[in-house]
Image (tube, rainbow, N blue to C red):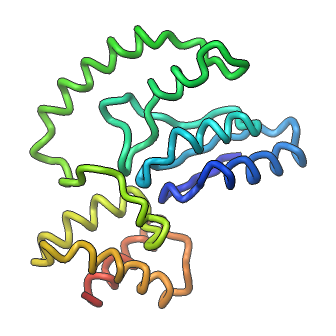
Amino acid sequence: LAVKDMAGLLKPEGATKLIGAIREQHPDLPIHVHTHDTAGTGVASMLACAKAGADAVDAAMDAMSGTTAQPSLGALVASTAGTDLDTGLDLGEISKVNEYWEECRGLYAPFESGQKSGSADVYIHEMPGGQYTNLLYQSAQLGLTGQWSAVKTAYATANRLLGDIIKVTPSSKVTGDLAQFIV
């Protein structure tokens, strides 16, 4: 079973309840959890999922993690080292690979969205991670630079107007387009 948390809304307490309940009802079912780290709670939530019985959680190399990407692999490996959830991965080796990605990321910096940090307001607007960075770029191209807060607020409004739909492509795109028209 794949649990896909597109917007990174899964908090540690909720992760424990959700994955724990699934594991209790389906003890032999493989459970794989995917999230985004938009609010900055991804590592804590994925640790909670693992402790509650998830078999796999998604993570990204440290240099590519955080914000609308996945939680940090290095942080998960270090947090579980020496516990019953130990991944068996060597943090030193992961760090060596991460150095490569740190260098690569610098080359692609001109193409980044401009998002500098996580933001807990994702719990208000519920924008999926991929939509967040795309809409940030789109809104700037439409002349809405400096109005990102208004776009995020409008996204929540658009979501309610559309019936609180499940937001994956293309429905997240429709919600984002409507948000921009609202602004």
The residue positioned 86% from the left and 35% from the top of the image is: 28
- Please state the total of marks drawn on the protein image: 0
Nearer the observer, 33 or 147: 147
Q: Is residue 168 above or below residue 31?
A: below
The residue positioned 35% from the left and 83% from the top of the image is: 154
On the rendered structure, is 128 left or right of 178? right
On the rendered structure, is 94 left or right of 81? left
The residue positioned 41% from the left and 15% from the top of the image is: 94
Q: Residue 29, position in %: x, y? A: 81, 39
Q: Is residue 17 above or below residue 144?
A: above
Q: Is residue 167 above or below residue 44?
A: below
Q: Residue 59, position in %: x, y? A: 48, 34
Q: The C terminus lies in which quarter of the figure?
A: bottom left
Q: Residue 54, position in %: x, y? A: 71, 37
The residue positioned 68% from the left and 52% from the top of the image is: 13
On the rendered structure, is 48 left or right of 4? right
Q: Is residue 89 above or below residue 108?
A: above
